[in-house]
């Protein structure tokens, strides 16, 4: 495997001094898609926030392109090419599709906008529509398209399927997969639609109570449903 772009090493992070993620190791290489699975409250969002520098680490290490993630300066992590699409999508209701795409990159890059929109053709005819007037699926596409306009090295997407029909998710996940491959973006997804996510992923990790309880190639996890189900529902062994 090529060298990892995104690395978590014994990552400990949480809220109000209480760890929600307890010693997570992960690595995502350029062009690779890794999915974080697990039940509600397992620590998936906490992991993404810590990797993005939006939560302080309580232990361990996080790095992007070999540089440590510094929660006191999360803008540096963003400048290095990290984009996080949060589960609420992070859009501004009064701004149009076009305005979101313009604001996404430090300098205007119409060619890039065009290339990204080609992956999400449903947005093409909606350029002048305000984000607040888009459907849930269109909003999700816009959030991801805006992240991609910035030519990220790392893209993290938190529960993109929240409130969306599986068909919409089925359309969007392959677009992310293709962009990752074509541009060497390291992608970390958090997803509840297990089968859809595994179908576009190289590897997956299952978190349960803040610990990695199962990891492996996506195709193996897809064929070993019993193991996957057990990882969701069994309590992890105490360390
Ligand atoms: P979900 O699928 O429900 O979003 P998750 O796997 O993303 O779950 P997290 O959101 O990371 O899990 O939550 C991990 C733990 O941290 C949970 O026990 C949750 O209650 C707690 N937690 C999350 N956010 C906060 C917060 N802002 N303040 C306090 N505790 C929090």
Image: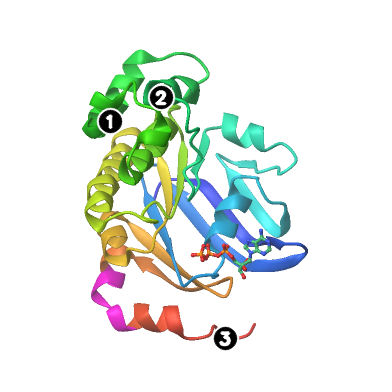
Q: Earlier in the sequence, mark 2 or mark 1?
A: 2
Q: Is residue 93 above or below residue 84?
A: above
Spot occupied by residue 48 in the image (x, y as percentages of width and height): 55, 53
Tell me, yes or no, whether the highlighted magenta stretch contains residue 125. no
Q: Measure the alpha-carbon separation of dots 1 and 3.
A: 46 Å
Q: Earlier in the sequence, mark 1 or mark 3?
A: 1
Q: Is residue 163 above or below residue 238?
A: above
Spot occupied by residue 29 in the image (x, y as percentages of width and height): 43, 47
Asked which quadrant contains residue 184, the reply is: top left
Give me the disc on residue 237: 3
Magenta-highlighted residues: 220-226
Give me the disc on residue 96: 2
Q: Residue at x 29, y 20 (%)?
A: 114
Asked which quadrant contains residue 182, the reply is: top left
Q: Earlier in the sequence, mark 2 or mark 3?
A: 2
Q: Dot 3: within a 10 Å radius of its alpha carbon, few (fewer than 14), some, or many (20 or more) residues?
A: few
What residue sits right under mark 1 in the picture?
123
Q: Residue at x 32, y 56 (%)?
A: 202
Instruction: Indicate the secondary structure of the residue bearing disc 2.
Output: loop
Q: Residue at x 46, y 35 (%)?
A: 153
* Left or right for 145, reference 57: left
Q: Measure the alpha-carbon separation of dots 2 and 3.
A: 49 Å
Q: Nearer the viewer, mark 2 or mark 1?
A: 2
Instruction: Indicate the secondary structure of the residue bearing disc 1.
Output: helix
């Amino acid at each position: 495997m090529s060298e990892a772009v995104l690395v978590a090493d014994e990552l400990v992070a949480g809220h109000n001094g209480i760890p929600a993620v307890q010693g997570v190791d992960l690595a995502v290489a350029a062009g690779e898609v890794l999915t974080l699975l697990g039940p509600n409250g397992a620590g998936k969002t906490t992991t993404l926030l810590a990797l993005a520098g939006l939560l302080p680490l309580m232990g361990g290490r996080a790095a992007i392109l070999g540089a440590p993630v510094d929660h006191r300066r999360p803008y540096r992590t963003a400048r290095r090419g990290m984009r996080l699409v949060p589960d609420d999508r992070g859009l501004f209701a009064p701004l149009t599709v076009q305005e979101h795409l313009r604001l996404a990159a430090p300098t205007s890059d119409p060619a890039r906008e065009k290339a990204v929109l080609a992956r999400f053709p449903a947005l093409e005819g909606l350029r002048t529509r305000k984000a607040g007037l888009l459907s849930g699926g269109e909003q999700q596409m816009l959030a991801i398209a805006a992240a991609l306009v910035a030519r990220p090295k790392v893209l993290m997407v938190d529960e993109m399927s929240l409130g969306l029909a599986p068909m919409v998710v089925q359309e969007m996940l392959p677009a992310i997969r293709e962009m990752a491959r074509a541009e060497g973006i390291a992608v970390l997804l958090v997803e509840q639609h297990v089968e859809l996510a595994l179908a576009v992923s190289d590897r997956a990790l299952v978190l349960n109570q803040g610990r990695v309880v199962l990891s492996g190639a996506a195709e193996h996890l897809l064929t070993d449903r019993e193991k996957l189900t057990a990882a969701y529902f069994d309590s992890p062994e105490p360390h």
